[in-house]
Image (cartoon, helix red, strand yellow):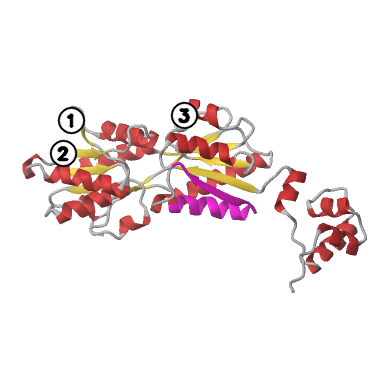
Amino acid sequence: MTASPATIKDVARVAGVSVATVSRALNGAENVLPDTRQRILDVARELRYSPSGAARSLITRRTDTVGALLPDLHGEFFSELIRGIDQAARARGLHLLLSSSHDDADEAAAALRAMNGRVDGLIVMSPHADDDFLSQNLPPALPAVLLNSGVRSPTQSVFAVDNFGGAREMTEHLVRSGRRRIAFLGGPAANFEARERERGYRAGLPAGVEPWLLEGDFSEAGGQRAAQALLALPAAGRPDTVFAANDIMAIGLLGALVAGGVRVPEDIALAGFDDIPISRYVSPALTTMRVPIAAMGGQALEALAQVLERNAPDVTTTVMPVQLVVRRSCGSAKN
């Protein structure tokens, strides 16, 4: 027969103190004598006492849990982002509660409401997270940090990728490489990142050159659909380059173009954005803009942790720099 787990009353009895003293000692209160605290800790260890998280939260009003609301949990971008958030949370002794909105505004709102009371703070990355959405669904007292948001909030710090600057730099690189008919495969119209990357593409085109826009949705299937639309055109009417607004669309585009008999980069050059791990292993390897994905997640968690510890700096907007990575898919590199 398995023995019942030790309770706080057992610790108090063996240590010869009150239950309240045990509670104060285990929760780090200062009004416990050092010798008494050590005796209680030793007894708790010997009895293998594990404090109830629910009970502790009633005392400290903390759950030691942070939430992250993301548009999706699938794909290498979000895997890297979650890795960065989780590593930083573990280093702080915090648990991580994840939720996905599946790019749906109602689901994002429901997730925010469901997390209230279960987490001490939130990291929010959602294409729907504008001022109105946040004011209606994010409790004012719940600390939050925003990722890749166009919101400039007086109460929440924002970490955003340099989407505009990176897309402009990529387009300028393609122009310098001799590309003239550069099409841009965009993302969802309501997505802040997609809009910024399209704006950067437009800014990088030479004066007088009209933009060539293809519809996309940030998915591999979206890249495949764009490829089918290009394959339906006569070869002379196709772009000589497609700059996709993210890597996963570029990879879908690459596979469908090659299957359709198009040589990359000889017939059509390709470029992406994000530098997800698989982008260096496809053939030809993908030219892209490197985003510090894991680092952004880690820095966002660190900023949130500082808010929770009440020693946060002023609310800031941090723009994460990106880096051009030239590989064979654009015809400008040997690797």
Q: Amino acid at mark 1?
A: Val
Residue at coordinates 22% horizontally, 52% vertically from top-left? Answer: 254
Q: Residue furthest front?
A: 1
Is residue 201 shown above or below 62? above
Q: Quadrant of the N terminus?
A: bottom right
Measure the C-alpha gap from mark 2 to mark 3.
36 Å
Residue 317 lies in the magenta stretch: no
Measure the C-alpha gap from mark 1 to mark 3.
33 Å
Is residue 329 shown above or below 129? below
Which numbered marker is on residue 130?
3
**What residue is disc 1 on?**
209
Residue 150 appears at what percent x and percent y?
44, 31
Residue 98 lies in the magenta stretch: yes
**What residue is disc 2 on?**
180
From the viewer's side, name the closer residue of 13 and 228: 13
Q: Residues within 10 Å of mark 3 (few under 14, many from 20)?
A: some
Residue at coordinates 66% horizontally, 41% vertically from top-left? Answer: 308
Q: Is residue 233 visible?
A: yes
Q: Which residues are magenta?
A: 79-101
Residue 156 appears at what percent x and percent y?
56, 33
Q: Amino acid at mark 2?
A: Arg
Horizontal side of 254 relative to 120 (left or right) equals left
